[in-house]
Image (cartoon, grey):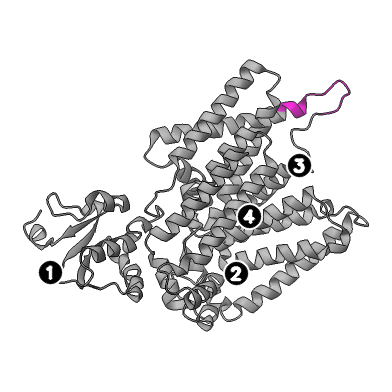
Amino acid sequence: MLAFALILLAGIGFKIYKADHTGILYDESFSLAHFGKSAQAALTSYVNPNNNHVINSILICFGRKHFSSYEHFIRIHSMMFGVLFSFSAAYIIHKTVESKILKIILLGLVLFNWFAFDLSFLARGYSIAIGAIYAGIALILGLLSNKIKYAYRWVPIAAVVLMNFLALGSMLSCLFVLFSVNITFILYSSYVFRDAPNKRNPVLLNLISIPSFTFVLLYLLYKELYKDILNARSDFGMIPFGTLMKQLLIDTMAGQDNNFRFIVYSIFVLLTGLSVLFGIYQFCLKTKNGIRQLYLRLDDSGVFIFLTTAIAILAMFVHRVLLNMSLGFARNAVFLLPLVLISAGILLDKFWKNLKDNKLLGSAIRGCIIVVTILLTLLNLPSAHAVEIHDWDRQSISGPLLHRLKDTNPDKIWKIRLSKETRYLTWPLYYYMQFGYKFQIVRSRNWDVAVLYKTDKPARAIYLDEDYFSKFNCCVIVNPQNAISSGR
């Protein structure tokens, strides 16, 4: 599986490259300034709207203490958890998909999805939580296929509790996916051991021990913060459930203004739907012996993924619709997206396998699956420069801009002016001051460069590296005062 390994290494290499080259964002620099300069601040401070992702803040403290000479030291731990996510996703796909070709293209689809990719290296809680959750799922699938002795029953308990602590200690909004992983694992507890005295004991043991240990550890972590968190729970919006699912599962994959991308994604969804219908058709048929042919068996690793995905979506539905409580923003549910893509891949794999008897139709559908999945991957590749989530694209210019100004004149104190649309660059730019970059952010007409969003781009101006900075949806104007005063 050389191609599989090469795609995995390419995904990891690209993630490391982007973590190193993309500028620091507002939320990241805010985390360092308010929560990441001491363990006490990490454990006791809470400021909205950029709330404290506690374990992320603690690891920022560690990085600042030991690796402060590296400009992006605050991303070292998040990048490592992003790499862990990549390895875990590869293992999950390897365990749940049989077709070698489909394994390769599905891995590319999951690892290079721009939305999950960008959130898996930033110095916030997303990367830690997604790395911990998918590592936990990978470990569980490994235990299901390589059963252990009941004498070692505390090993999976410790692993799941650690997963819960790292994920919820970093990002509370991962609760729904994490809850589904825990519930599914508890239901599958008896399948983990080869010599359990009965099927009930492992289930009861995990049902009692995992929530108990998790609660104790999280209480110790959040005991100084939980009141602030509860008081701030209304600050994260009340997006309707359907709107959030559309933003997460449709807009991130099909875009909002790209018809071709929408068509490709629609065909991908259609093929997944056909695989479900084919599975139902197979189940309804009877063999000569009168035994129904199951599309998926209960002990199949794919069923574990399906149950986890379904329980997560159901938990989110109950929380938002029935309990009328906030789910946050679409990016807070990023942990669900890889599960949905892997679930779709598993269904397509079963469809692929069961069409082998029909050579003509099977070849046509398999070819369609390959082409559509590759196209969907290529249409959803992450930018090599900017973080294309929310307004983070323009914030990503922070480091590259200062590098360019320093290369131009390392001794000059550059006067930088920001517009209304780029004002959130203030915190990211100030982050780099600790590394000797010389600049001032000014509001007067006496500036050297101005950073404008693409919608504010003047018709005529002197641009600094226009093509390069356009990749951040920005333009950098040199000595723009004359152009602005003349109304251009």
Label pair 2/1, CB-CB below 8 angstroms = no
- Residue with the mark numbered 4: 134
- Residue with the mark numbered 1: 445
Amino acid type shown at disc 2: Gly
Mark 2: few, some, or many residues within 10 Å (few <14, many ≥20)? many
* Magenta residues, start to end: 281-292
Q: Secondary structure at mark 4?
A: helix
Q: Left of 212 or right of it: where is 51?
A: left
Identify the mark nearer the N-term, 4 or 2.
4
- Residue with the mark numbered 3: 300
Q: Position of residue 444 (x, y in %)?
A: 15, 72
In depth, the one of 44 and 405 nearer the eye is: 405
Identify the mark nearer the N-term, 1 or 4.
4
Amino acid type shown at disc 4: Tyr
Distance in Å between CA atoms under marks 4 and 3:
18 Å
Q: Position of residue 190 (x, y in %)?
A: 84, 53
Q: Main secondary structure of the magenta part?
A: loop
Q: Quadrant of residue 315?
A: bottom right
Residue shown at 9% from the left, 57% from the top: 483
In depth, the one of 240 and 476 nearer the eye is: 476
- Residue with the mark numbered 2: 169
Q: Per the image, is 284 magenta?
A: yes
